[in-house]
């Protein structure tokens, strides 16, 4: 039987800046309705494909959870086959986190959206109303529009002339769909995610 890690121990690891991966094994829709702030959504259906990229060190402490769907035992078996050595289950699953009185959040990318709001409030990042952005896109030939959302969201819908450039890839130069002309020959407009995350009611 898989050993367990309590919600309090997960929180303590975060506070003390220990390396720990809290993985939500559900698909995106239920994850978006309720999850701990720093949980990583990696559904069982994609676990084998993505875990080595998402958690490259196989001795990282991994804590798995679901919401009663029975996903944790199968995920733990898979990770053991892939030679991960420190895999546990979150005691009580998502409901255990809630019973412990710890906060749950809605939407996806909650932490990055909160960080974006913090930067905007501290650095007073300029913004452009949608009608002005439309006029700028139509009139400025050298404008580069970067869409900072996840590629899946970009594929669903995007603004005209937008290029997929997910924010996590900026630091390593990945994720652009076409080269970005250097300043001052071009202006850059950033299409960022809506600040829609927040605690669950």
Image: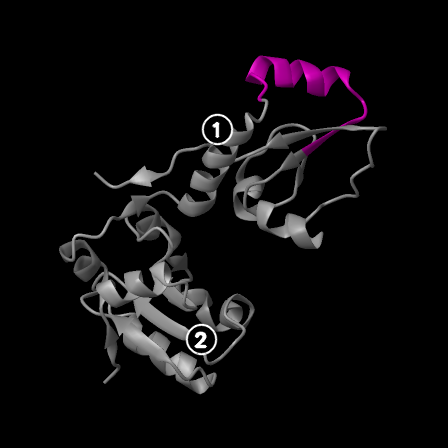
Q: Which residue is mark 2?
A: 60
Q: Going from the N terminus, do you reach mark 2 or mark 1 first? A: 2
Query: From mark 2 to mark 1, how far is it between C-alphas?
Result: 34 Å
Q: Nearer the viewer, residue 137 or 54?
A: 54
Asked whether 136 falls inside the magenta stretch, the response is yes
Which residue extends farthest right?
Answer: 185
Q: Quadrant of residue 185?
A: top right
Which residue extends farthest left?
Answer: 99
Residue 125, x across and y down, in percent: 57, 27
In the rendered image, the vertical position of residue 108 relative to residue 92, given as above or below: above
Q: Is residue 119 left or right of residue 79?
A: right
Element at label 1: helix
Question: Which residue is rendered at x = 29% and y = 60% of the image?
Answer: 11
Element at label 2: loop
Q: Which residue is mark 1?
A: 121
Q: Nearer the viewer, residue 188 or 139?
A: 188
Task: Nearest to the eye among marks 2 and 1: give it.
Answer: 1
Question: Which residue is rendered at x = 59% and y = 19% of the image?
Answer: 128
Asked whether 141 falls inside the magenta stretch, the response is yes
Quadrant containing the C terminus in the rendered view: top left
Image: magenta residue range:
127-145
Q: Nearer the viewer, residue 114 or 26?
A: 114
Q: Residues within 10 Å of mark 1 (few under 14, many from 20)?
A: few
Residue 24 visible in the picture: no
In the rendered image, the vertical position of residue 63 relative to residue 197, given as above or below: below
> Pointers 2 and 1 in contact (CB under 8 A)?
no
**Which numbered disc covers residue 30?**
none
Residue 53, x across and y down, in percent: 56, 68
């Amino acid at each position: 039987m898989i050993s367990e890690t309590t919600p309090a121990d997960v929180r303590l690891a975060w506070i003390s800046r220990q390396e720990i991966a809290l993985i939500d094994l559900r698909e995106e829709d239920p994850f978006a309705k309720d999850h701990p702030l720093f949980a990583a959504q990696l559904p069982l259906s994609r676990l084998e494909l993505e875990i080595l990229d998402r958690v490259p060190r196989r001795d990282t402490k991994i804590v798995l959870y679901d919401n009663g769907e029975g996903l944790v035992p199968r995920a733990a078996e898979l990770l053991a086959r892939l030679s991960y050595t420190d895999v546990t289950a979150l005691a009580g699953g998502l409901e255990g986190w809630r019973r412990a009185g710890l906060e749950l959040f809605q939407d996806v990318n909650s932490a990055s959206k909160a960080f974006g709001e913090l930067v905007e409030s501290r650095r007073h990042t300029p913004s452009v109303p949608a009608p002005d952005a439309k006029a700028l896109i139509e009139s400025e030939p050298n404008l580069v529009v970067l869409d900072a959302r996840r590629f899946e969201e970009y594929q669903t819908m995007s603004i005209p002339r937008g290029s997929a450039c997910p924010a996590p890839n900026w630091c390593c130069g990945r994720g652009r769909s076409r080269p970005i002309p250097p300043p001052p020959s071009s202006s850059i407009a950033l299409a960022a995610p809506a600040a829609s995350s927040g605690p669950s009611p």
